[in-house]
Image (cartoon, grey):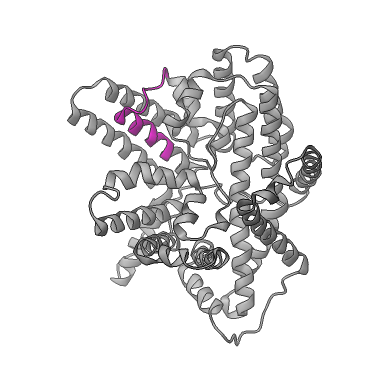
Amino acid sequence: MLFYEPLFLFLFFPLLLIIYLVIGRTRTARKWILLLGNFLFYAWSEPIFVWIVLASSFVDQRIGLFISRSENKRTRIFALALGVVLNIAILCYYKYTIFLITNIDWLLQMLAKPQVALPAIALPIGVSFVVFEKITYLVDIYRGLSKPARDFSQYLTYVFFFPKLLAGPIIKYHDIVGQFEQFPESHVDDFFIGLSRFMLGLVKKTLLADTFATGADLVFAQSPANLTSSDAWWGVLFFTLQIYFDFSGYSDMAIGIARMLGFRLLENFNMPYIATSMTDFWRRWHISLTSWIREYLYFPLGGNRTGAARTYLNLWICFLASGIWHGAAWNFVIWGAYNGIFLILDRLFLLRAMNRVPLWFANLITITIVMVGWVFFRATSLPQALQMLDLMFSLVSANTSAIAIAADLKTVAGIGVFICVMQRVVAHKPDFRAMFEGPRWQIAMQSALSLLFIAGVGKSIATPFKPFLYFRF
C-alpha cells in the first residue's frame, strides 16, 4: 500500500484518521488504534514477513529488558551483541543471500565446479529501515539514552509506525520515545500543516519524480553503444532529479502523515543539491541515514579520536557500509566506496579548495561529483555503469542515438533544475525569501499546491504503477 494509491488516499488513511481523532480521546485508545492501523498497513503488503518482524521484536524487547536490568557490563555487551547480530542476520538473509550465492557461484564456475542453484527469496518492503531502527532501540538502552518501552505494544508501535515504515526517515528510538510515551493529541494546526506537507510530497512524486523516471528509464534501458554522450548526460540528469524528488517526496508525505496524527518526525532532506562540497552534501541528503551511521557506526569505530589515518579509514568504512546497505550489488559497493573517497579528499584538501572558489562553482563541481556517483546507483550492472561514464566524458561521440528524448521530458527536467537553483537563491538571499512570506503569497501558494495535488492524484490513478525508489530497501 503506497501513500498515493487510491486505497490509501480514499479509504485507509481517511478512515484511520477519523477513528483516531474521534475515538482516540485517551492515550491508551490512541495507542491501540494506531498500533492496529500500523499492523494492517504493513500486513497488507507483507503478510508473511510481518510475523517475522513481530517475533524478532518480541526478542528485542526481552533483550532490552535484560540489558536494562543487568549490572554486569560483559553480560550487557553480550546481550547487545546478540540482539544486533540477530537483526543483522534477518537483513543479511533477505537482502544479501542471493548476492553472496551469485558471487560464490561465479568463483565456482571459474574453478569448473557445478553451479549453485539460487534460492527464491523475496526482499521484504522496508527491511533495511526496520532492522536499523530495531538496532537503535537496543543500543539506546545499552547507552542509557532511553529506557525500555513500557510494554511490548509500545515497542511495536515504534517498529511498525507506518508513516516511516516503508522508506524512512530512519527514526532513532531516543528521538521519538517521548512521543510514543505520551501519544500526543492531534490539533487543527497539526492537520493543516501535515496535509500541506503531504500534498507537497505527492506532487513531487507523481508530477515530477515519475516524469523524470520515464526519461531515466528510456536512457538506461539502452545499451551505451546505442547512445550519444548527450543522451548519457540526459539520462543521468533525469535520474539525479528523480531520486531527489522521489525520496524527498516520500519523506514529505511521511512527515505530513505523522503530523496529522500529532507526531513530529525529523527532517530527512535539506536542499542537498545546493551543497558546495561532498561533506556538505551528506549533511543535507538522507539526513536520518547519515546521522544513524555517525552515531551507531562511525563513533563506535573510534570516530576522529584515533588519529588522521584511522579517521579516514573509519569514514571510508562507514560509506562502504552505506553502499552495501543500499543494495546487494557491486554497483552499490562501488557507489559507497566512491563517496567515502571524496569525503576523505574533503578532509585532506578538497574542502579548503572549495572554500576558495565562488559558491556557484563549488556547487557545480559538487553536483558533477554526485551525478557521477548516481551512475553507479542507477546502472543495471557495473559494466553498464563504466560504459556510461566513458560515454559521458568522451569528447567526441561516434555513436548515433537510438532514442529520441521528448521535448516535454526536457522541459520538466528544466523545471526540476530551476527548482534546485531557486533553492540556492532562497537559502542565500533572505530578502528574496521574505518577499513570499506575506498572507497573499501564502494563499496563492496554497491554492497552487492544492491544484497540483489534485493533478497529482489524477495522474497516480491514470498512469501505470511506479513504486518509490526506496520501496524495497
Q: Residue at x 78, y 46 (%)?
A: 452
31 is higher (above) or lower (below) than 459: above
Lateral position of residue 436 relative to residue 24, left or right = right
Q: Nearer the viewer, residue 90 or 339?
A: 339
Residue 441 on image: x %, y %: 79, 42
Q: Residue at x 46, y 52 (%)?
A: 326
120 is higher (above) or lower (below) than 412: above
Residue 110 on image: x %, y %: 31, 71
Q: Residue at x 37, y 57 (%)?
A: 320
267 is higher (above) or lower (below) than 149: below
Magenta segment includes 67: no
Residue 14 on image: x %, y %: 71, 28
Dividing the picture into quadrants, the one containing residue 331 is bottom left
Which stretch is magenta?
132-151
Furthest-front residue in this view: 431
Magenta segment includes 148: yes
Lateral position of residue 262 relative to residue 5, left or right = left
- Quarter containing the N terminus: top right
Dividing the picture into quadrants, the one containing residue 329 is bottom left
Q: Nearer the viewer, residue 201 or 388?
A: 201
Q: Is residue 79 in view from this perspective?
A: yes
Q: Is residue 117 in view from this perspective?
A: no
Residue 99 on image: x %, y %: 40, 57
Q: Residue at x 34, y 55 (%)?
A: 315
Magenta: main secondary structure: helix
Lateral position of residue 242 relative to residue 362, left or right = right
Total residue callouts: 0
